[in-house]
Every structure is written in structure tokens, then in C-alpha cells.
Image: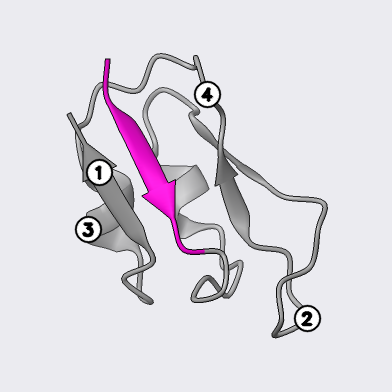
């Protein structure tokens, strides 16, 4: 099973990765980062296939995909 790593400090919380994830493996966090925005977070055990759509669409390059 694949997993993704999100750099919460680089994320601006635009939500594009949430929209493009076919498995719904990403959600908005409730915590604020240092920039004062709510970054996204990976939902562990959510069935990530490692498709890399999230990393490709992220305008901040804040997502790394591991298979």
C-alpha cells in the first residue's frame, strides 16, 4: 500500500489534492500551520494506490508519494 507525505508548512490549503484524489485519501487538517492556514493531511489506512495525482496537481510541491 502506498502512502503520501505532506509538508504542512509548504501547504497553503488550496484543496486541489483533495479534489483530485480518486480514493479520498486526503482531508483538511484542523490545525493551523505557521502561515496561519489549515494544511491538508493524509488519512492513514485509506487505500492510497500511489497514483501521484495529488503530487502532480499540488502548486506548492508539498506532497511526496511513496509506493
Please name the residue that numbered disc 4 is placed on. 44
Q: Nearer the viewer, mark 2 or mark 3?
A: 2
Please name the residue that numbered disc 1 is placed on. 65
Q: Is residue 37 left or right of residue 58?
A: right
Image quarter of residue 1: top left
Q: Is residue 4 magenta?
A: yes
In the rendered structure, find residue 33 and report the number of the disc placed on it.
Answer: none
The answer to whether residue 12 is above or below residue 23 is below
What is the spatial separation of the Cα atoms under label 4 and label 2, in whole angstroms?
Answer: 24 Å
| Image location of residue 26, percent across then percent down | 53, 38
Residue at (51% x, 45% y) in the render: 18
Please name the residue that numbered disc 2 is placed on. 36
Point out the stretch of residues depicted in magenta. Answer: 1-7
What is the spatial separation of the Cα atoms under label 1 and label 4, in whole angstroms?
Answer: 13 Å
Tell me whether circle 2 and circle 3 mark residues in contact (CB < 8 Å).
Answer: no
The answer to whether residue 3 is above or below residue 28 is above
What is the spatial separation of the Cα atoms under label 2 and label 3, in whole angstroms?
Answer: 24 Å
- Earlier residue among tags 1 and 3: 3
Tell me whether circle 4 and circle 3 mark residues in contact (CB < 8 Å).
Answer: no
Residue at (38% x, 76% y) in the render: 60
What is the spatial separation of the Cα atoms under label 2 and label 1, in whole angstroms?
Answer: 25 Å
Residue at (81% x, 58% y) in the render: 31
Amino acid at each position: 500500500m502506498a502512502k503520501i507525505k505532506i509538508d504542512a508548512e509548504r501547504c497553503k490549503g488550496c484543496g486541489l489534492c483533495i479534489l483530485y484524489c480518486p480514493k479520498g485519501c486526503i482531508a483538511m487538517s484542523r490545525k493551523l500551520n505557521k502561515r496561519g492556514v489549515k494544511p491538508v493531511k493524509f488519512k492513514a489506512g485509506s487505500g492510497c494506490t500511489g497514483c501521484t495525482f495529488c503530487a502532480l496537481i499540488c502548486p506548492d510541491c508539498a506532497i511526496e508519494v511513496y509506493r
